[in-house]
Image (cartoon, grey):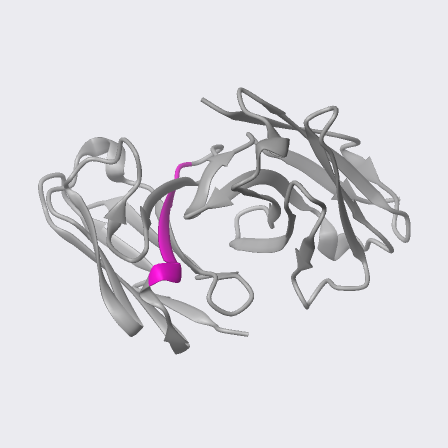
């Protein structure tokens, strides 16, 4: 099973700042099989990025994904108030697993 | 716009079988091209994928749950279902159904299932 480790656990930032979230895999993951989600309290997760760098339908361009192999990054260029949430990475190259999440909170 | 809705008992006794159904609207399971998944989330914790089924009935389960999980599909009702046997308190979670192709692009709202006597 591929283990995804997300860091940091919590990111405290102000609106307008840049957020950089990391997802590290225990073994190499094809970029085609890496996705990112946003989850707000009481809601289901929402797909942001698939294929490591492709934005899902309706996702603003302030969200971007990058990386390959075992290291992937989600970047939010300028945080909007609605972006404060928990973010998860997910792979389906070998079985299917999620990372433990990064909470982006208001500083 | 496809929509998914989970239904089933919110309380299950230990050692019994948890049964949930996901009803899909705005799209047909039988048209193919997607996988239909079950995912759960411990309250306040992370996400665990349970397994998926496609329109023809092919399944793939999380190895950690294999042996206890059965996912089935009824294309005539546009529904797919989850059965998880021999449940314990550790199976208490919010259960989501979700569609996937390139990522999980549509989700149900989730339903809390508590395992307790």
Query: In the image, A29: left or right of B3?
Result: left
Quick one: which residue is furthest to the bottom in this view?
A27
Q: Tell me which residue sits at (26%, 70%) in the image.
A: A68
Q: In the rendered structure, which segment of residues is drawn in magenta?
A: A32-40
Residue B21 x, y percent position in the rendering = 73, 33
Q: Quadrant of the N terminus of chain A?
A: bottom right
Viewer-side residue, A104 vs A69: A69
State whether the magenta stretch is mostly helix, strand or loop. strand
Quadrant assignment, res B95:
top right
Residue A38: within the magenta? yes
Quadrant assignment, res A81:
top left
Residue A92 x, y percent position in the rendering = 48, 61
Asked whether residue B53 is in view, the answer is yes
Query: In the image, A69: left or right of B65?
Result: left
Query: In the image, A4: left or right of B14?
Result: left
Figure label count: 0
Asked whether residue A44 is in view, the answer is no
Quadrant assignment, res B98:
top right
Q: Tell me which residue sits at (68%, 67%) in the image.
A: B64
Residue A15 x, y percent position in the rendering = 13, 39
Residue B88 x, y percent position in the rendering = 81, 55
Q: Tell me which residue sits at (41%, 48%) in the image.
A: B102
């Amino acid at each position: 099973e591929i283990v995804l480790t997300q860091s940091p656990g919590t990111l405290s930032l102000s609106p307008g700042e840049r957020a950089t979230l990391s997802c590290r895999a225990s073994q190499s993951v094809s970029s085609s099989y890496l996705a990112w989600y946003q989850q707000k309290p009481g809601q289901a997760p929402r797909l942001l990025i698939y294929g490591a760098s492709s934005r899902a339908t309706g996702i603003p361009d302030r969200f971007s994904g990058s990386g390959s192999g075992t290291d992937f990054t989600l970047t939010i260029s300028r945080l909007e108030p609605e972006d404060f949430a928990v973010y998860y990475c997910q792979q389906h190259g070998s079985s299917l697993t999620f990372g433990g999440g990064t909470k982006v909170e208001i500083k | 716009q496809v929509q998914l809705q989970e239904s089933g008992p919110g309380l299950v006794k230990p050692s019994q079988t948890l049964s949930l159904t996901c009803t899909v609207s705005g799209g047909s399971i039988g048209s193919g091209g997607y996988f239909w998944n079950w995912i759960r989330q411990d309250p306040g914790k992370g996400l665990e994928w349970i397994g998926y089924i496609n329109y023809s009935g092919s399944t793939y389960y999380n190895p950690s749950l294999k042996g206890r999980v059965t996912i089935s599909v009824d294309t005539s009702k546009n529904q797919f279902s989850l059965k998880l046997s021999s449940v314990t308190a550790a199976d208490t979670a919010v259960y989501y159904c979700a569609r996937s192709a390139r990522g999980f692009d549509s989700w149900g709202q989730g339903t809390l299932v508590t395992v307790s006597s």
